[in-house]
Image: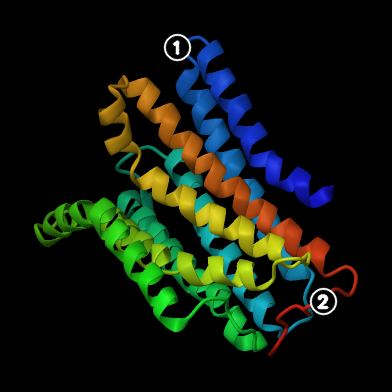
Amino acid sequence: MKFQALALLPAAWVGAFVAGAAAVPPAIAPTFIRTEIEAAKVMTLVGCVAAARAFSPGDYLRRAWVVLGGCWVLLLARDALFLGLPRGALVAGVPIENVMAALATGANVLGVVSTFMIAKAWHVAGLELPGKPAQRAVAMALWVALSVAITGRAALNDGRLLFAGEVPALVGLSSAVCDLLSMCLVAPVLFTALALRGGRLRWPWAFMTASLLFWLFYDAGHVLAQALGLSEFAERVLRESFRGLACLYSFSAGVAQALALREPVSPRPPRAA
């Protein structure tokens, strides 16, 4: 039941968020949305810490979860600067916009590295993934094509802006590129979940797969909103709902990882050093 509750938690979280966004007065709606964003990020960090603490020092997946936690630490630090200091302020003599760009870029890189490590866990543990190699290659190619279709234009636009000297565009460019790389890892994470079907250890990878999928929906949020004819406010609520689902499924993955390791199960968890 604990794992089923973790599966339902993200949907309940987003349901409460959507209801709250519809109910609060327009004047305080931006504050309400920002509060939900930061709370979701903190929850994700909590999940990373829970998962990392479940492993012994030096274990492969402990390192993966620590790296993912570092991603969220940098993002929260970026947000603290954004919320706490005015535009144009200096941080150790450096414009705040440049510092925030560096923090966001570093977070994006750590996010990709951690996702790659989690996606590679099946190989480290010596698991045999389901399906034929050709089928897995086709699945990978489809995800790459879908990711390029969603993030490619944004990456090109931000690349042109960065080349023109607009440093803040580095955030958008790194985010688009890292999202593309992360999406390429959906297939191996999903295949790992399928390889572990029937055991508790399938839950962390299933939740991580869901998280990656909702990040893809988050990136596609603007296109979806235009197709649905949504207002600017409704579009933001839609995109933040996808972000909330992505964050909370990462939280669920981390907590599920910790719960799954509390007692021996079969197959054994990937704990290779």
> Does 220 sit above or below residue 257?
above
> Can you identify the residue that label 1 sits on?
26
> Residue 70: where, in percent of width, then height?
56, 65
Q: Is residue 78 left or right of residue 196?
A: left
Give amino acid for label 2. Answer: Ser
Q: Is residue 102 left or right of residue 78?
A: left
> Residue 141: where, in percent of width, then height?
32, 70
Q: Residue at x 26, y 29 (%)?
A: 226
* Dot 1: element: loop
Name the front one of labels 2 and 1. Answer: 2
The residue lying toward the viewer, choosing from 57 and 102, is 57
Q: Which mark is residue 266?
A: 2
> Does 35 sit above or below residue 185?
above
Distance Cα–Cα, label 2 vs label 1: 52 Å
Q: Is residue 13 visible?
A: yes
Give amino acid for label 1. Answer: Pro
> Does 176 sit above or below residue 243?
below
> Residue 202: where, in percent of width, then height?
70, 65
> Residue 218: where, in percent of width, then height?
41, 44
> Does 159 sit above or below residue 40?
below
Residue, far right: 263
* Dot 2: element: loop
Q: Residue at x 49, y 42 (%)?
A: 243
